[in-house]
Image: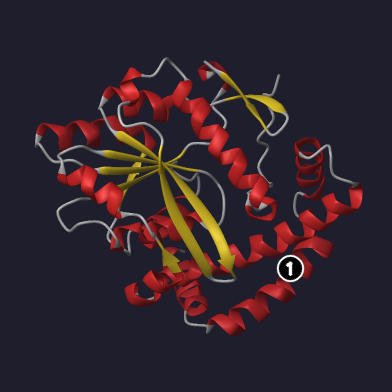
């Protein structure tokens, strides 16, 4: 099954971008008008997040989201064969030297990311780091073992390593014991499990529980946190700009780093609302 899935993704990855986006245009109509994939959830999320917008504006954002969503799925398949040179041209990190300088000083880095833009292409960050450093992408293990193995393969093609969330502390501790700094990439806008809720944040007209694990890990190991602004410039082209959240996060009060992350994430969503992942039930535990 893995071989068949990998063969299919590999075949899609060799399709030229122009043809790929033509295919995306066709599949968008199927996804939106026929399959109607999670349409009710997406409409509710958008309506509650943008109460100031008219129904017509909500529908416009909704359609643009589904169009982008299909683009993103097919772009992710491109990770199976795209060259490092092509990826560096399509995903740029204009001020990544800031993070490299932190690592040269012997300190580790945590990248706080949201489900904005094509976060899977963020795996190309491995092409921009110094050779002596390593970037670990923290991820949730997928229920389907075939898809889990396939996504792990795609994410590691550009020189990164994937670290399952439960193994994060062990990985960081091991690097620290060897005196080697590292870079961690965390998608921090997941909803925590009900039993793990510790803190609520204001986010898109909701009061939602924030995932505080990334903040705890960053403070515990003395990492320098950066927020990643992942902007879509046009089809197939993205820019990842870093913003330093705090040079010494351990000095911040509890949960202030989490609040700061959600503040930047909300601004990112307001700038490009169609590029956020609205198909997930982000507000299921909202107060």
- Rendering coords of residue 175 (x, y %): 16, 38
- Rendering coords of residue 88 (x, y %): 37, 70
Task: Check disc 1: other Cα within 10 Å, few if <14, some if 14-19, many if 20+.
Answer: many
* Residue located beneath label 1 in the image: 28
Q: Residue at x 57, y 50 (%)?
A: 116
Task: Please give left or right for residue 229 compared with residue 98 in the image.
Answer: right
Q: Residue at x 83, y 50 (%)?
A: 58
- Rendering coords of residue 196 (x, y %): 51, 19
Q: Secondary structure at mark 1?
A: helix
Q: Residue at x 43, y 43 (%)?
A: 141
Q: Quadrant of residue 49?
A: top right
Whether 16 is drawn above or below 274: the answer is below
Which of the two residues, 215 or 177, is positioned nearer the viewer here? Answer: 215
Which of the two residues, 282 or 255, is positioned nearer the viewer here? Answer: 255
Q: Quadrant of the C terminus?
A: top right
Whether 238 is drawn above or below 219: the answer is below
Which of the two residues, 89 or 123, is positioned nearer the viewer here? Answer: 89
Task: Please give left or right for residue 55 compared with residue 201 in the image.
Answer: right
For the view shown, which residue lies furthest in the left direction? 178
- Rendering coords of residue 225 (x, y %): 36, 36
């Amino acid at each position: 099954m893995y071989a068949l899935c990998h063969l299919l993704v590999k075949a899609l990855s060799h399709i030229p971008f122009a043809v790929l986006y033509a295919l995306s245009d066709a599949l968008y109509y199927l996804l939106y008008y026929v399959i109607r994939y999670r349409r009710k959830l997406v409409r509710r999320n958008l309506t509650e997040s943008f109460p100031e917008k008219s129904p017509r504006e909500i529908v416009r954002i909704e359609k643009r989201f589904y169009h982008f969503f299909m683009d993103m799925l097919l772009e992710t398949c491109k990770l199976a064969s795209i060259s490092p040179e092509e990826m560096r041209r399509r995903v740029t990190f204009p001020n990544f030297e800031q993070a490299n300088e932190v690592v040269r000083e012997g300190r580790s880095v945590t990248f706080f990311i949201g489900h904005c833009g094509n976060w899977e292409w963020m795996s190309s960050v491995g092409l921009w780091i110094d050779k002596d450093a390593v970037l670990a992408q923290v991820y949730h293990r997928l229920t389907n073992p075939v898809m889990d193995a396939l996504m792990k393969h795609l994410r590691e093609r550009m020189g990164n390593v994937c670290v399952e969330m439960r193994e994060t502390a062990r990985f960081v501790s091991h690097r620290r014991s060897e005196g080697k700094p590292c870079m961690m990439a965390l998608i921090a806008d997941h909803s925590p499990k009900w039993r793990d809720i510790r803190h609520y944040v204001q986010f898109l007209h909701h009061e939602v529980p924030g995932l505080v694990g990334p903040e705890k890990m960053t403070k515990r190991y003395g990492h320098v946190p950066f927020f990643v602004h992942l902007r879509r410039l046009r089809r197939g082209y993205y820019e990842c700009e870093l913003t330093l959240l705090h040079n010494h996060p351990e000095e911040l009060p509890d949960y202030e780093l989490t609040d700061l992350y959600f503040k930047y994430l909300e601004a990112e969503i307001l700038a490009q609302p169609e590029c956020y992942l609205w198909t997930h039930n982000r507000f299921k535990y909202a107060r």
